[in-house]
Amino acid sequence: MGNRWKAQNVRLKYTFIKAHPREFDTAVMCRLLGVSRSGFYAWLQNPLSDRAVEDQRLLGLIRAAYTASHGVYGAPRIFLDLREAGET
């Protein structure tokens, strides 16, 4: 399985741990789910990776370009618009 799936799986586990702090001990949940406590606490400080933040920013630019074209532009034209705007 790919790294992206593994990363999503870990985020799901962290989300579960965050949602159930009163029902179960954090250390026990981390051990049973196979994630590190330090990783969980680091995730609490910054739940989105740099890549996820960049993806959200880029998605906003894509949606803005699509809206500006009144829904006419497809992927090739939006790609060219973003390139002209300096995106790589």
Image (cartoon, rainbow, N blue to C red):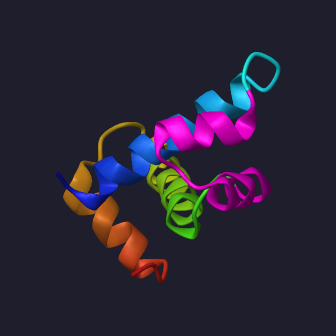
Residue 69 visible at all:
no
Q: Residue 5 vs residue 86: left or right?
A: left
Is residue 19 visible in the rendered structure shown here?
Answer: yes
Q: Quadrant of residue 56?
A: bottom right
Residue at x 50% of width, y 66% of height:
51
**Residue 20 inside the magenta-drawn segment:** no
Image coords of residue 62 (percent x, y): 44, 54
Q: Main secondary structure of the magenta part?
A: helix
Most foreground residue, 56 or 4: 4
In the displayed structure, 52 sits above or below 83; it is above
Q: Is residue 15 above or below residue 80?
A: above
Question: Is residue 40 located in the magenta-colored stretch of the structure?
Answer: yes
Whole-percent x, y for residue 9 in the image: 40, 41
Image location (x, y in percent) of residue 28: 65, 36
Residue range (magenta): 25-46
Q: Quadrant of the C terminus?
A: bottom left
Q: Where, by quadrant of the figure, is residue 54 drawn? A: bottom right
